[in-house]
Image: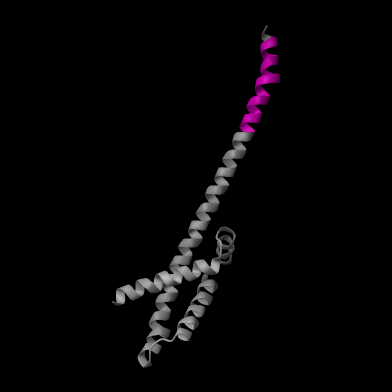
């Protein structure tokens, strides 16, 4: 009788349990990888926001201020300053974060552009 129960356990229950543990382990691993990737994307977006704030404030205090001392900003000035901001932001971002953002967002340049516009808007609001 004990041999029959032992055979049923060894041949029937143990493979099911082992298979279940394998599936569960794979699912847990997938969840951990997804959570890790989400955390990395969040870190990249946080870094982008901090760098953008710094770059926009710096350009506002230097380039924009210098131009406004002699004349109003033209559309060409605004484009040049924005291009410089994008260049500076990308050069200060870690390459791995830029790659991660590129893989997980529609358009990194558009995301950077949106961050710049948001910071410029906030600076203009504080200046009023």
Find residue 17 and report its horizontal and vertical position in percent.
Answer: 63, 26
Q: Residue at x 50, y 69 (%)?
A: 112
Number of disc labels:
0
Find residue 53 and report its horizontal and vertical position in percent.
Answer: 42, 71
Q: Residue furthest left?
A: 128
> In terms of image quadrants, where is residue 5?
top right
Q: Quadrant of the C terminus?
A: bottom left
Instruction: Name the side, left or right, on which 120 lies relative to 48.
Output: left
Magenta part, dominant SS: helix
Q: In the image, is residue 112 part of the stretch drawn in magenta?
A: no
> In terms of image quadrants, where is residue 55?
bottom left
What coloring was used for the rendering?
one colour
Residue 57 position (above or below residue 37): below
Residue 16 position (above or below residue 97): above
Instruction: Name the side, left or right, on which 92 lies relative to 60.
Output: right
Q: Residue at x 48, y 77 (%)?
A: 85
Find residue 28 and report its horizontal and vertical position in percent.
Answer: 57, 39
Q: In the image, is residue 7 part of the stretch drawn in magenta?
A: yes
Q: Residue furthest front?
A: 75
Q: Which residues are magenta?
A: 3-22
Residue 62 position (above or below residue 1): below
Q: Quadrant of the N terminus?
A: top right
> In terms of image quadrants, where is residue 10?
top right
Instruction: Name the side, left or right, on which 74 lies relative to 108.
Output: left
Q: Residue at x 43, y 86 (%)?
A: 74
């Amino acid at each position: 009788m004990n041999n029959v129960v032992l055979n049923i356990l060894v041949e029937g229950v143990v493979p099911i349990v082992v298979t279940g543990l394998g599936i569960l382990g794979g699912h847990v691993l997938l969840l951990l990888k997804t959570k890790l990737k989400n955390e990395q994307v969040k870190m990249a977006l946080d870094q982008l926001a901090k760098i953008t704030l710094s770059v926009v404030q710096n350009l506002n205090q230097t380039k924009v201020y210098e131009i406004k001392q002699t004349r109003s900003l033209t559309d060409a000035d605004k484009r040049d300053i924005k291009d410089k901001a994008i260049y500076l932001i990308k050069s200060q971002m870690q390459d791995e974060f830029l790659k991660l953002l590129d893989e997980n967002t529609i358009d990194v340049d558009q995301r950077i552009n949106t961050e710049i516009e948001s910071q410029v808007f906030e600076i203009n609001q504080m200046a009023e």
